Image (cartoon, coloured by chain):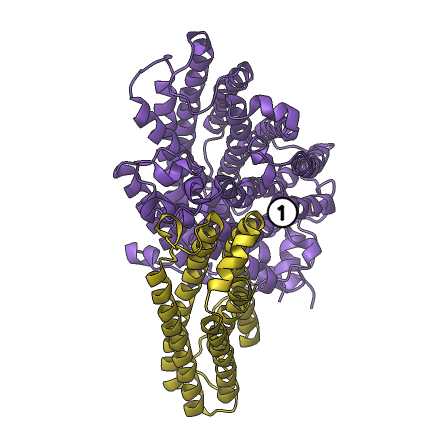
Chain colours: A purple, B yellow
Amino acid sequence: MSAEPATEVVAAPLPNYLEAESGVASWLNTRDHKRIALLFYVSVLSMFALGGVFALALRTELLTPERTVMDAMTYNRMFTLHGVTMVWLFLIPSIPTVFGNFILPMQLGARDLAFPKLNLISWYLYVLGAIVTIAGMFAGGTDTGWTFYTPYSDSTPTRVVPVVIGIFILGISSIFTGLNFIISVHTLRARGMKWSTMPLFTWAIYGTSIMLVLATPVLGMALALVGLDHALALGIFDPSVGGDPVLFQHIFWFYSHPAVYIMILPAMGVISEMVPTLSHRRPASYTAIVVSTIGIAVVGFLTWGHHLFTAGISELDAGFFGVLSMFVAVFSAIKVFTWTLTLRRGSILITTPILYFFSFLFLFVFGGMTGVALATQSLDIHWQDTYFIVAHFHFIMVGGSVTAFLGAAHYWFPKMFGRMYNERVGTVGAIAVFMGFCLTFIPQFLLGNLGMPRRYYSYPAHFQWLHVLSTGGAFLLGGALLLTLTNLLFALKWGPRAGDNPWASRSFEWLTTSPPPKHNFATTPRLDYDPYDYSLSEEECRARALAR
Amino acid sequence: MRAHSLGEQYADFAQQDHALKLGMWVFLASELLLFAALFALYAAYRTMYGDDFREAIAHNTLAYGTVNMYVLLCSSFTVALSVWAVRQSRRVLAVVLLLSTMALGIAFLVIKLLEYAEHFRERALPGPYFHMAELPTFGANRFFTMYWVMTGVHAFHVTGGVCLLGWLVHRTWSGHYTAAHHTGLELGTMYWHLIDIIWIFLWPILYLA
């Protein structure tokens, strides 16, 4: 049958997922991956705000060399809570649970994820984990830092147990989410879709999910053991009964280093979608992006030792871990070059999402290069436990992941809500986020290089000007994020209608209406073509995909 | 809810069953990694305290561990047979087999508790609670700490597995599983086999050498 009849099969339009059902129960009891994505969206943004408030409190305290607004113990608790909140309650779940949940099934041409009920359970577990963790914070909090290093965490008088129980529950939520994505990719790809034509964001989420499923249980066990040590004094990592605290560091980082890639791979996936769409070009090499995604997912498991360079591991081990860590930089560089090359001779749409891409490019490369420097043992010994480390990982986590999260929030906003945000405010927000970020963290590189240790409450007076700059940057960043959020919230209600495909993308999630109907596609699509083929017109794509 | 509902996202039952089984395999992989953390800790401490570990293992009662291994092996056999029985549409037999599996699981826990009681009397306890006059070493302390944690986590899984079997008994008895559709039962048996396999690896490192 020719493609013509398919284009006229436009029956009465289906109600979109937001309007398909109404009432609070229809949200709390939903199985729709898009609604669950929005539940996660609200939850992780609330946690992001909470972690941000902790960060601003820390930066305010550091305005002066001695006490400014809080005592030393409160400060220790505050940086722990900032780390715990940002890592486990925001960064790890952020892109996968929100955009992965929303976009991945549509990119597969599926009606939902493989296990919708498990998806909802995953959200409830997230909420439960968040409540337990936050309750632990209010019940006194803990002062170990988000890394819970033993033997201090075995014996600190603060409340470690509720926080590790909360993180354990969040881990189960992560595993369920990852499992759901893996199985969906394996079993629910639309007719005609091969692994070699699967959209790049889906590839990234798939790689991330494998890491989530295999690394998270190890963290769960590590933290459960710390909890047992703290609550029952089992002494698993306690040297006074023969235990080895460094073993904790090994199993902790066996998860927590892959966790870095759990945070950055989805971000790379977002970029890999935005760049081809917004420059209307096929990616310079689809294969290079996929291979480097898998490469990062595999090598990510073999680099944890670089966190232990100064913890007494052998020179040989340190050498191996250093070299393996640098492989991550090779794979990342392949991606960076591929994205940049994709822009060449493209017709680039200068909009807010692409500004976030430019910002990502600069910050991620900067963060990545300092990472290569840190993977070099001799340099790491100088920078170990200084603000240099803090600045480095914030460049990756905030400069990379959060920037891509914000890019995704703008790029997929019309897909999710059918409306357009204000472009001018979006642009101002993107530039202000970038400037605020640089102002916060570039001084921290300088501080670290001068020898300012991380997690210290007081510091010598000659460091003050750099701390003041950093605090100023943090408030600018906070303000910029608030502006961005306001812009998006405003557009939810008052933004102009965006149309189904405002970026004229060829990726599969844009084939259906925006916002999509409850089960995404009116008919099951056939996706047997390249999602980045800009030689096909939008109409041709639609006709080809949705023909019966 | 109907006895066997096909999710909106699936084209047919074959696809749904495939997804469910694959999902279980991925979950089991995740469970294996949970135990892998403990096996890694065991390996590290054993490397540090090899001789002390061997002495401490010799102190453990081999009979408890071995009997328990056979108990779990038999339970794996009965649980596998229950799937066969459902495929033959022999519902009552399947229920009997599942109940035997449960009984074996409970027997495992009872034997484990007897052994724990013995260790408790000897003060072969983890960390600072460890007070064994005949093995006053850090290594023996480490061994028994790992012993309690590993068998504890395993016993926790056995308990969960027994509850799961109870649910499967209920579903099988009420005729939920038919010769054509019994994926839920198969998933449960896969999980039970994992519990057995973990013990097969715990047994040599905690009782043999």
> On screen, B54 above or below A284?
below
Could you say where residue B51 lies in the image, as x and y percent from the top left?
Answer: 56, 53
Residue beneath the point at 41% across and 33% down: A145
> On screen, A72 above or below A326?
above
Residue beneath the point at 42% across and 29% down: A481
Question: How many numbered marks, from 0 up?
Answer: 1
- Secondary element at tag 1: helix
Residue that numbered label 1 is attached to: A297
Q: Quadrant of the C terminus of chain B?
A: bottom right
Which one is nearer the viewer's eye here, B96 or A308?
A308
> On screen, A75 above or below B11?
above
Could you say where residue A377 lies in the image, as x and y percent from the top left?
Answer: 64, 28
Which one is nearer the viewer's eye here, A218 or B6?
A218
Q: Quadrant of the rendered structure where residue A106 is? A: bottom right
Q: Quadrant of the N terminus of chain B?
A: bottom left
Q: Is residue A40 visible?
A: yes
Please give left or right for residue A476 compared with residue A385 in the image.
left
Which residue is situated farthest in the front direction here?
Answer: B134
Could you say where residue A452 lies in the image, as x and y percent from the top left?
Answer: 49, 17
Residue beneath the point at 37% across and 86% down: B173
Which one is nearer the viewer's eye here, A427 or A198?
A198
Chain letter of disc 1 in the image:
A
> On screen, A334 above or below A227?
above
Q: Amino acid at mark 1?
A: Ala
Could you say where residue A410 lies in the image, as x and y percent from the top left?
Answer: 50, 37
